[in-house]
Amino acid sequence: MKFSKSELDIIYQYAAPTKAETLAGMKEIVPVIKDILTKAIVENAVRKLERIPEPECSQFIAATKARFLAERDNSIRQRLAAAKLQEPIMQGHDLSGKERFHPETRHMITLEVQKDCFVGFKGERFRFYLSDGGYRNAKHSEQDGEIKIKSHAAVVAGKLYPDKKPRQQER
C-alpha cells in the first residue's frame, strides 16, 4: 500500500506502540481539524492503516517513526558537522573589551596560530589589543612561523583604523 509523504508525517506524529492506539489518536483529531486538505490526509491515512493487518501495521508504524527519527538525527548531525567546518571561534580580547581603551594600546590584530606555541594551539584564532612593544613581539612570532597575522588596525583612543588592503590585480 502506498502512503504519501503527508500521510507518513501524520503517522509519525501520532505513532503509538499498537495499531489501535495510533488509530485512536488519529481519529480523535479528525473532528477538530479545520483545514479540509489536512482533514482528508488524516482520513486517508486512517483508512489505509485500517486495511493493514495488526502485526504488520504495528511494524509499519514503528518503522515509519524510526525512519523519521533517523532523518531528524542525520539532519542535526549534518548541521553540527557544517558548524564545525566553519571558521574557528575567535578567542582573546573582545571587540569592545577594556584593553582597547588603555592609553598604551596602539594596535589590534587578529591572528591564527600556525604551530603550537605560547599563544595557543595550531588552528586557533585570536584578537589582541597591543602596545607597540607587544606588536613587535607579534611580528617576531610571525617571522618565526608561530602565528599568521590575518588583520591589523591602528588604535587611537579606542577607535579602530583598519589597514587598507592592496587591491589585487585583475587577470
Image (spheres, rainbow, N blue to C red):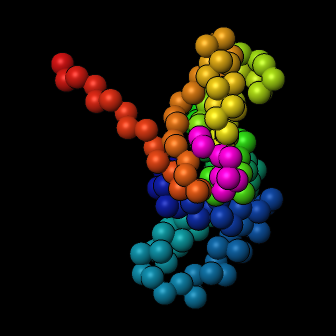
Residue under the point 59% across and 37% down: 109
Q: What is the quadrant of the C terminus in the image? A: top left
Residue 70 placement, left or right of 4: right
The x, y position of residue 159, in whole percent, is 53, 56
Residue under the point 52% across and 61% down: 7
What secondary structure is the stretch in magenta mostly built from?
loop
Residue under the point 77% across and 27% down: 120
Residue 118 placement, left or right of 45: right
The x, y position of residue 132, in whole percent, is 64, 35
The x, y position of residue 1, in whole percent, is 52, 50
Q: Residue furthest left?
A: 171
Residue bounds of the magenta highlight = 100-107
Between 118 and 30, the residue placed more toward the observer is 118
Above/below status of 38 relative to 109: below
Between 152 and 21, the residue placed more toward the observer is 152
Above/below status of 38 relative to 143: below
Can residue 78 be seen at all in this image of the molecule? no
The x, y position of residue 77, in whole percent, is 66, 40
Residue 32 occupies which quadrant of the picture? bottom right
Between 159 and 14, the residue placed more toward the observer is 159
Residue under the point 42% across and 81% down: 36
Total labels drawn: 0
